[in-house]
Structures are given as C-alpha cells and as structure tokens.
Image: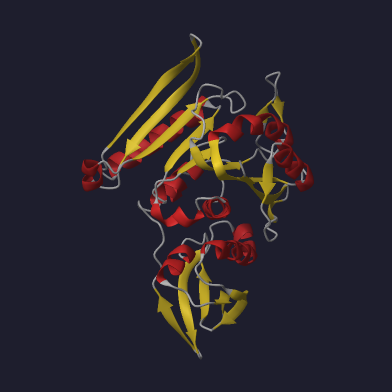
Amino acid sequence: MPRYALLLAPSANRVYADQAARLARAELAAFRSALSTEISDIGGAVLGGVEYLTFEGSLADRDISYISNLSAAYALFSVEGELLRPVELTPLARYDSDLITIPKYAGKTNEQFTKLVLNLTLLASASADRMLDGHLTVLDPLCGRGTTLNQALMYGYDAVGVEIDGKDVEAYKLFLQTWLKRKRLKHSADLVPVRRQGRRAARRLEVTMAASKDDHKAGAVQKVTVLQADTTQLDGLLRGGVADVLVADLPYGVAHGSYDDQGGITRSPLDLLERAVPHWLPLVRAGGAFGLSWNTKVARRELAEDILVANGLELVPQEPLEHRVDQGIERDVLVARKVG
C-alpha cells in the first residue's frame, strides 16, 4: 500500500502550532468521506528530524486535490524506502493568499483554524462531493471582519455574513475594496440600508468580484453579502435556503460577548446559540451542515449538543478537536447536519 508523508505548515500562533499535528490527524480522518479510496494508519513520524503526518492509501488525482486543502498542509511526499518523492499539491486558491493573511485585528480567529472548521463542515454536508467544484455558498452568521468569508472566496464560493457591529462591517468593506483595487480586479461594492415593514432594519454590503478579467467577462463572478443586523432577528432579511453550510465562531466569553434580549451583553455562547439556531436553520439547505467553535471553559460541549439536537440537527461523529488557545480559552468544534 502506498505510504505518504504530509509536512505541516508553520503557524504564526505558537500555541496552535504545538497542537496542529493532532488537529490535522482529526481533519484528515474527516476527509475519508470524500475520497475514492480508503486511507489508513494515520499517524505521525519524524523523518530527518522533521515531524510529518503519515498515512497509507492508493490516492487518485482527485483524492490528492481534496487532501491538498487540509488546513495545515504544506508539502506532500510519497515515501519510497528511505526517500521522499514530492507530490504536487493542488489546493483551492482562487486568489492570492494575502486575502486571508493581511487583515490583523484583535479577536481575529487563526486562519488555519478557520479553514479547518470550514473543511469539516463541508465534508459533513451533502455538498462534500462538490467541494472542489465551486458554486457553493457559505454563511457565517457571526462574521466579524470576514475571516470565514474570505476563506470561502479563496475556495471559489459565494459568502454571506451577518454582523451586528457596524464598525466591523465598514472595516471589512474598506479592506475588501482596497484589496480588490490593489489587485486590479473588477468588482462592485455597495453598502445600502435595508427596510422591513417600512422601517430601517439593517444595512447590506453587496460585493461582486471576479478572479480575472476573463472571468468577469464570462459572468463567472462571486458574491459577498454582509448584513449589519442582529443574528437572532433575521426574518425577512435573507431568503430561505441561501447557504450550503453554516460556519460560526461563537463569542468566547472573555473579550467577546453577544447581546441578550434586553440589549445587554451576555458572555455565554449557549445563550446566543439557543436564541439564534431557530433563525439560522431556515437559511441552510437540506443536507447542509453547521460547524461551530466556542470556548468550553464557559460552555460545556454536551449543552451545545443538546441545543442543536433539540432543533432537529444530527450530530456528526468526529475525532477530538478540543485544544488550548490561551489561559482563558479551551476551544472545541461541533459539527451537525440538517437532515430535512
């Protein structure tokens, strides 16, 4: 059976890098559902003094294309005796990587982790077999300044976000417009008020963009929509079934909070989840999946699972992904599928 060694990318976050190998093993195990062949003996090995993620399998070209998108993938080799033969990776990368790496701000989620959660969610959904082909829509109902939205764009997808903080929406618009102008990519961007029952209910950022002039000419454009609105009050603001998957990084209860029904700040991600999931469900198509991350120090996993199950979602089994972020945050990932 052919054997492979995957070199993991370095991470700017030292704490995350220390745990990357374990998280990558769990992520690679999730990719099994999309591959045409079985992979086995997933583990680690030190070769020439460098740690690799190793596994066995008879990989076809499309299988390699899937594995190329592993969030921590840096280089892939086939193991031939004591030698490593490079295998070309073909990750989804519609734009330059600085679309993801340039934004720096307090509370930004690690880019590798954002990609990991998106991958796990896509692989758990009915769209897993179309992951490499584009034409999907990712919804982040707590999008902040758009890390998940930008990763969706990198994959060639459309993106929809919801963010209650108007400053974050404006900052995202400024960054994306500036980046598109600097790259000389054709685009349009408008931030307009949205009215509901005669009253202003939100603001909507609409961005249309293309990766090249030829794509734009051919109509092969991507769209980003960001609503400045309360994620628990979305009735009439987004059409049903707008997204194939939903990915959200819940407030951690340390530097971040969410608004409760009285307009005050609550530090519990469970309070937000309980109020928001009924509003999120109609936005995701049947067979879609939810991928959520949060701080387990302020919310136990079983309680988060109970909320999703109570709303009719089916939990997706996965290898353990809990990991330390800093002294006050132990982060975990939960994936669930919308079955009907």
Pinpoint residue 33: horizontal percent, then vertical percent.
Answer: 56, 62
Which residue is located at x 51 percent, y 10 percent?
A: 197
How is this picture coloured? secondary structure
Pinpoint residue 330: horizontal percent, then vertical percent.
Answer: 72, 51
What residue occupies the far front of the structure in this picture? Answer: 340
Pinpoint residue 29: horizontal percent, then vertical percent.
Answer: 61, 65
Residue 178: quadrant of the picture: top left
Residue 159: quadrant of the picture: top left
Which residue is located at x 52 percent, y 59 percent?
A: 71
Which residue is located at x 68 percent, y 32 percent?
A: 272
Up the image or down, 126 lies above or below 230; here it is below
Residue 338: quadrant of the picture: top right
Q: Is residue 9 visible?
A: no
- Count of numbered tags: 0
Q: In which quadrant will I find the N terminus?
A: bottom right
Q: In which quadrant will I find the C terminus?
A: top right
Residue toward you, 330 or 38: 38
Q: Is residue 209 visible?
A: yes
Residue toward you, 258 or 136: 136
Residue toward you, 255 or 292: 292
Pinpoint residue 23: horizontal percent, then vertical percent.
Answer: 62, 62
What residue occupies the far top of the structure in this picture? Answer: 198
Up the image or down, 43 lies above or below 301; here it is below
What residue occupies the far bottom of the structure in this picture? Answer: 81
